[in-house]
Amino acid sequence: MEGLSTYRLGYVAQSLTLGVSASHTCRLATATPRRLEALAAQNLEELEQLLRFNAEHGIQVFRIGSSLIPFGSHPVNTLPWWKTFEGTFATLAHIARRSRQRLSLHPSPAGASLSSRHQRVRDAAIAELRYSARVLDMLEAGPECRVVIHVGGAAPSRPEALDAAHRVLDALPEDLRQRLTIEHDDKVWSAREVLPLAREHGVPMVGDNLHNAVLPSEPPMSVAELVREAAATWRALDLRPKFHLASQQEGGRPGAHSDFVDPADLRAMVSALDGPADFMLEAKQKDRAVFALRRDAGARRSPKAQGARAS
């Protein structure tokens, strides 16, 4: 199916084949301007390796690590990195654009909470979103390239937390809104709770099959319904839908990602598609998980495999 452009597969931040991650950082106590600039230069060099590797292997969906520019949203980083590395970003943008790579960032939930009752936490979330959006802008990424964030916690109560998230999104500048996508999670906010938030504010929702299994909606939402409803939030903006795809780690805590993605989990989501879509694999084996799923799909489509099944 991937060869027919029904779906594309991508991975998160690090190529195990190359052994690079473009996510080097340091402790806050050692975050001097000189150290931060050196780390940023190293990360950008590794990002070029990753983008060229993706282009060579036809991988068009990739999540950049949020530490590309270490402490990019923190006051400790006073570097004008967007000026210092302007030429480097232009080179990266050319590679990504030529190979049609869909790029994204996903700040940690701790660093990007919309629902906190504390203004400083909400301000930090906006700063992280602004930094991440700037990275995508510097890479000349299209409108389908987004910053993925979770809603956050539910304190002091679910209604108050949800109201705080609404107020943050209401006040969000349009340029940041156009870089945002919201994801339901596996601990606090279910898909059926996040969907209305996304719809009301005109931002797409990333559907996650494992989150949906670990934290079911009320009433429960099937994988097919999740795919259909989440896809509609992207198509309302004339954008190709994007999903997160993961399999439960055997023996791990609920929601722990396995090394690879079970092909059955991919098939369950693909079977519900009504058009092209992208899947970000959240698997510990990173790019190797992409190659493994491709091999499975190729084996299932091959005449030899079809003949074996018929016999």
Image (tube, rainbow, N blue to C red):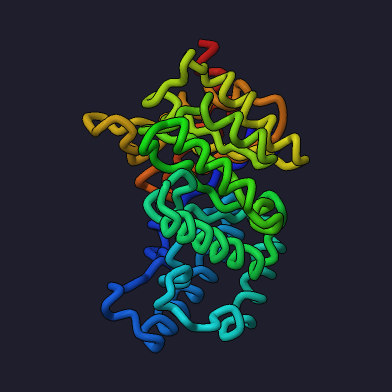
Image quarter hosting the N terminus: top right
Residue farthest along the bottom direction in this orientation: 34
Relative image position of residue 40 (x, y in whole percent)? 45, 77
**In the foreground, 23 or 211:** 211
Residue lying farthest to the right in this orientation = 238
Residue 234 left/right relative to 158: right
Instruction: Identify whether 36 is placed above or below 189.
Output: below
Q: Residue furthest top?
A: 311
Residue at 57 percent of width and 82 percent of height: 85
Residue at the left extreme, as displayed: 251
Residue 122 position in % (x across, y down): 47, 54
Q: Is residue 114 above or below residue 40?
A: above
Q: Quadrant of residue 16?
A: bottom left
Say above or below: 296 vs 178.
above
State the residue at coordinates (26%, 30%).
250
- How many marks the image carries: the answer is 0
Q: Position of residue 99 (x, y in %)?
A: 68, 59
Query: Which residue is more in the foreground, 71 or 14?
Result: 71
Q: Is any atom of residue 111 visible in this view?
A: yes
Q: Quadrant of residue 8?
A: top right
Residue 187 x %, y %? 36, 33
Whether residue 263 is visible, yes or no, is: no
- The answer to whether 237 is drawn above or below residue 173 in the figure is above
Residue 240, picture quadrant = top right
Q: Residue at x 43, y 35 (%)?
A: 185
Comparing 178 with 94, the one in front is 178
In the image: residue 191, left or right of residue 97:
left
Residue lying at 72% horizontally and 30% vertically, measured from the top left? 275
